[in-house]
Image: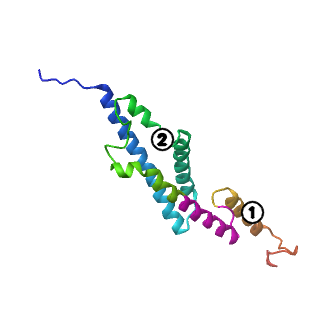
C-alpha cells in the first residue's frame, strides 16, 4: 500500500539534533541561573552545580577544537554542513554561540568571585565548601560549653 521508506540515518540525525537542542537549553538555563544568582549575590550550591554544567560543556567544546562534538556525528549521518543547530536555532545565533558565551561566562565568574570574596570579608566561610557547616557546628559546641572564655561557669547559681 502507500508505505514510504524511512531513512534510519535521517531519523537518527533528527534525534541527534533534538538531543543537541535539549542539551543546549539545559546549558543555557544553567548560564541564565549563574548570571541571576551572581547579580543577586547568591553563590550557593545550586550556582556551583550550574557552574559545573557550564564548565563541562566549555571543556568538551574546547577539547574538540572549539567545535561541537556532535558536528562529526551529524556529518556522518548525512548533514552536508555537519550542523546540529540548523533546525531549532536561528543560523546567526548558532554561528555566534561561542562569541556570545565567552563574555557571559566571564561575567558570571566575576560576579561569583565578588560574592565569595564579600562572604569571606564578612567572616563567613566559603559557601561552596563544608567549612560553613563545620563552623556552625563549632560555634554551637562553644555555646553548649558550661564555661565562658574566662573559664567561669555560664550556669546560673541555682543550676
Farthest-out residue, top: 1
| Element type at mark 2 | loop
Q: How far apart are marks 1 and 2 (CA)?
A: 49 Å
For image coordinates 73% across by 66% down, the residue present is 139
Left or right, residue 30 beside residue 74: right
Q: Nearer the viewer, residue 44 or 28?
A: 28
Q: How crowded is mark 2: few (under 14 residues within 10 Å), some or many (20 or more)?
A: few
Which of the 4 image quarters holds residue 158?
Answer: bottom right
Q: Name the residue under label 1.
A: 138
Q: Which of 134 and 143 is in front in this view?
A: 134
For the C terminus, the quadrant is bottom right
| Element type at mark 1 | helix
Point out the stretch of residues depicted in magenta. Answer: 106-126
By secondary structure, the bulk of the magenta-drawn segment is best described as: helix
Q: Residue 67 carries which label?
A: 2
Q: How crowded is mark 1: few (under 14 residues within 10 Å), some or many (20 or more)?
A: few
For image coordinates 46% across by 40% down, the residue present is 68
**Can residue 30 be seen by looking at this rendering?**
no
Amino acid at each position: 500500500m502507500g508505505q514510504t521508506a524511512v531513512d534510519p540515518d535521517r531519523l537518527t540525525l533528527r534525534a541527534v539534533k533534538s538531543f543537541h537542542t535539549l542539551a543546549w537549553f539545559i546549558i543555557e538555563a544553567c548560564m541564565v541561573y549563574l548570571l541571576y544568582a551572581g547579580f543577586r549575590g547568591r553563590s550557593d550550591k545550586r550556582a556551583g552545580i550550574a557552574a559545573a554544567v557550564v564548565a563541562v560543556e566549555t571543556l568538551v567544546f574546547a577539547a574538540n577544537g572549539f567545535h561541537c562534538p556532535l558536528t562529526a556525528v551529524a556529518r556522518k549521518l548525512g548533514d552536508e554542513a555537519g550542523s546540529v543547530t540548523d533546525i531549532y536555532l536561528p543560523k546567526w545565533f548558532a554561528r555566534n554561540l561561542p562569541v556570545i558565551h565567552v563574555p557571559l561566562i566571564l561575567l558570571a565568574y566575576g560576579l561569583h568571585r565578588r560574592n565569595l570574596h564579600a562572604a569571606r570579608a564578612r567572616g563567613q566561610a566559603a559557601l561552596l565548601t563544608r567549612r560553613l557547616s563545620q563552623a556552625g557546628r563549632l560555634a554551637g559546641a562553644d555555646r553548649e560549653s558550661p564555661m565562658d572564655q574566662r573559664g567561669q561557669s555560664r550556669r546560673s547559681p541555682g543550676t
